[in-house]
């Protein structure tokens, strides 16, 4: 029996979409026809222009006609490889070409017969003088077909051709009733395309388009990209501003009384060092908020090691002194445990009752903390997602601190705040960005910034190394044998997978051969929490020499004795993430160094991107470059804003973001309930749902 449309939801109206396909699309955030129409393509391939291979730049798209010499496919370490050896006649001579796939391609073996002439369309890779096409299309050069093919993001279980067909079908279904959520006067003022023309250009570009328009589409900087990015940013900004208004509608339970001088002296008595001027400035801004009758909504941003924990403690100590409680949520158990270790002597000196709450604690241990919080017998609870469970309640919650805020969703922050009556909110991030941009990205929050590092901190010396990963490991081993320091090796994946990148087990095995007598251990997200905690404790104690890990160590690992870090295949990480990882070393006064390895060639686009980290240790500079390349979705988890490719509009993206902020403020000032903007209101409400944008 064929599946009923109702089982597949609204998408069931499309031919071939049953419950299984609808579920696969939903896992990618596509629930409605409108969502499907707004799936922005990842690229375009123009088959009309045959590109001379000798002239094609590394990373450029090329379309060539070639003759197949040999086809091969194999599995190695659980990874699939397929390759074609081809020859291309060019300029009166034969040019060798390799084609490479790292995932299965249906019918590839049947189409890749020796001696056959084929049209290959794909991304050029130049390594050691050899030419290759990565994941190319393979077609009959004489067969009819669209001159411009549209590429789509990967949706597991839904082929690219199927997704392309569904997107076009969704636009056709919606076309008669499509309503543009952007007011006409706003589109005119910002010179933005209408919704229907923009979607048509993205999903079904006219083959008569001039080459410069095709190039703009391929680069992600067409008028259609600009319009769709602005729409996503506007929806996010309206949602942020409405959330701020709702959050500040209720009076707070706990406020501070004036007494700044006394609190300063009390803080000095609790910590063994003098706060920096930047820390005192942030403390003053926060305390001013805490004396007001409306809840504080503030972001504290600062580079790795700038002292955000002390500022948050000062805020919490003030709330406890005023009779309130503090809930401090961290994204990992490692970070929560590290916070407790740091805060315990400060809390003891201040007379603050401190507790830890994590998922790995026994049921009776968690129940005891929950009872103490509900009875008001504990003042400050540091925890992970375990704080969000229904059995955890507070007698008088006055302040919620959310650490590494981009790791949590809007709904998670709201769940924690709902455990009190309009408590103050302080969110922390070590991904710093310029103040004006922060105001646009996290529009419901005021912003405090720490730009001054504690005295004596020396940032790591960072070096970029291109080439085989074995060379980077050998260099690391030489360094360890010579200097006898502790350190980290970071890999992009836990086990061998589809991408060309090292994994922790492979790295650890090779390093054990290079460093006999040294203790090398592995941690990652699949390691049992108790085992992971034990390994981290031994590493802090100095009994482990090299810790091989994934990004599980990105936050919460504070081992001042760790002096080196090798990050393998660094091109697989974002710049801000790499800066965070690098922040695990250089936490003392001694010299430390970070080696960024890349499998890309020296001088390639990937290597040039990574060079930013070798050139600067300033997190603001790093974050600006990351924003330009990958957009606010990567920096702050704004998934809605991150759907549209930001990189092509890097020069204009920030201006569009600030224009969206201004437009959102103006719209809400005239129409707070968006009564006259029903389609925009529907988009905003959809954005606010957990499944649509829980990471904002």
Image (cartoon, rainbow, N blue to C red):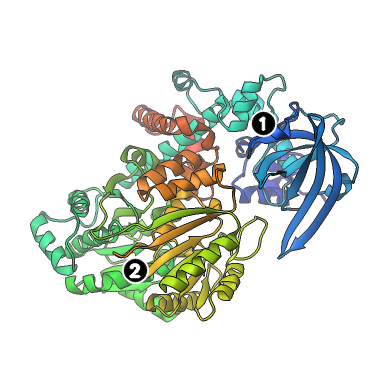
Q: Position of residue 641 (x, y in %)?
A: 49, 40
Q: Quadrant of residue 412?
A: bottom left
Residue located 89% across and 40% down the image: 116
Which residue is identified by label 2?
A: 560
Which residue is identified by label 1?
A: 203
Along the line of sight, which residue is nearer the eye, 573 or 674? 573
Q: Which mark is residue 471?
A: none
Along the line of sight, which residue is nearer the eye, 116 or 465? 465
Q: What secondary structure is found at the residue carrying circle 2?
A: loop
Q: Is residue 289 above or below residue 563?
A: above
Q: From the viewer's perspective, is the residue at label 2 or at label 1 nearer?
A: 2
**Is 399 on the left or on the right of 541, as rendered?**
left
Q: Position of residue 398 (x, y in %)?
A: 26, 59
Residue located 27% across and 69% down the image: 343
Residue located 51% across and 69% down the image: 477
CA gap, disc 2 to disc 1? 52 Å
């Amino acid at each position: 029996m064929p599946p009923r449309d109702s089982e597949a939801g609204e998408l069931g109206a499309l031919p071939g979409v049953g419950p299984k396909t609808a579920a696969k699309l939903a896992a990618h955030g596509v629930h409605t026809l409108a969502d499907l129409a707004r799936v922005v393509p990842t690229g375009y391939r123009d088959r009309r222009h045959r590109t001379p291979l000798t002239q094609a730049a590394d990373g450029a798209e090329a379309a060539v006609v070639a003759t197949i010499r040999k086809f091969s496919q194999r599995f190695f370490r659980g990874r699939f490889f397929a390759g074609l050896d081809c020859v291309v006649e060019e300029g009166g001579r034969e040019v060798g070409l390799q084609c490479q796939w790292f995932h299965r391609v249906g019918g590839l073996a049947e189409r890749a017969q020796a001696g056959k002439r084929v049209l290959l369309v794909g991304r050029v890779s130049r390594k050691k003088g050899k030419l290759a096409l990565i994941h190319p299309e393979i077609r009959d050069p004489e067969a009819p077909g669209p001159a411009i093919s549209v590429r789509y993001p990967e949706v597991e279980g839904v082929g690219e051709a199927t997704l392309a067909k569904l997107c076009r079908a969704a636009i056709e279904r919606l076309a008669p009733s499509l309503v543009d959520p952007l007011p006409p006067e706003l589109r005119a003022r910002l010179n933005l395309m209408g919704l229907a023309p923009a979607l048509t250009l993205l999903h079904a570009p006219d083959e008569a388009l001039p080459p410069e328009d095709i190039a703009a589409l391929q680069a992600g900087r067409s008028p259609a990209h600009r319009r769709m990015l602005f729409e996503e940013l506007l929806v996010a900004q309206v949602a942020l501003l409405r959330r701020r208004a709702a959050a500040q509608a209720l009076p707070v339970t706990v406020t501070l009384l004036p007494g700044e001088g006394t609190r300063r002296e009390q803080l000095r008595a609790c910590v063994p060092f003098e706060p920096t001027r930047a820390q005192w400035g942030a403390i003053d801004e926060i305390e001013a908020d805490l004396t007001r009758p409306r809840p504080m909504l503030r972001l504290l941003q600062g580079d790795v090691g700038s002292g955000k924990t002390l500022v948050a403690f000062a805020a919490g100590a003030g709330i406890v002194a005023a009779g309130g409680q503090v809930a401090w949520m961290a994204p990992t158990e490692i970070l929560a445990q590290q916070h407790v270790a740091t805060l315990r002597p400060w809390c003891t000196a201040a007379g603050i009752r401190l507790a830890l709450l994590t998922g790995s604690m026994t049921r009776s241990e968690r129940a005891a903390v929950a009872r103490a919080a509900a009875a008001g017998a504990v003042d400050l609870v540091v925890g992970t997602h375990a704080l969000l469970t229904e059995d955890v309640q507070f007698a008088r919650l006055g302040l919620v601190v959310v650490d590494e805020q981009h790791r949590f969703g809007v709904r998670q922050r709201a769940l924690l705040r709902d455990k009190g009556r309009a408590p103050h909110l302080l969110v922390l991030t070590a991904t710093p960005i310029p103040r004006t941009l922060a105001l646009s990205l996290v529009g419901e929050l005021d912003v405090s910034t720490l730009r001054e590092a504690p005295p004596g901190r020396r940032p790591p010396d960072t070096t970029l190394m291109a080439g085989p990963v074995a060379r980077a490991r050998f260099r690391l081993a030489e360094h360890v044998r010579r200097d006898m320091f502790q350190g980290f090796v970071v890999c992009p994946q836990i086990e061998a997978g589809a991408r060309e990148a090292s994994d922790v087990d492979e790295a650890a095995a090779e390093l054990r051969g290079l460093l006999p007598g040294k203790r090398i251990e592995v941690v990652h997200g699949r390691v049992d929490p108790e085992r992971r905690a034990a390994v981290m404790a031994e590493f802090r104690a100095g009994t482990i020499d090299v810790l091989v890990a994934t990004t599980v160590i990105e936050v919460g690992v504070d081992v001042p004795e760790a002096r080196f870090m090798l990050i393998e295949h660094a091109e697989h990480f974002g710049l801000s993430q790499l800066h965070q990882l690098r922040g695990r070393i250089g936490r003392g006064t001694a010299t430390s160094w970070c080696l960024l390895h890349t499998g890309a060639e020296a001088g390639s686009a990937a290597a040039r991107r990574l060079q930013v980290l070798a050139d600067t240790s300033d997190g603001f500079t790093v974050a600006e470059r990351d924003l330009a390349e990958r957009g606010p979705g990567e920096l702050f988890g704004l998934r809605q804003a991150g759907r549209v490719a930001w990189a092509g509009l890097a020069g204009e993206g920030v201006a569009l973001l600030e224009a969206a902020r201004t437009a959102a403020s103006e719209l809400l000032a005239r129409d707070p309930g968006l009564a006259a903007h029903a389609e925009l209101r529907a988009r905003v409400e959809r954005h606010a749902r957990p499944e649509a944008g829980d990471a904002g």
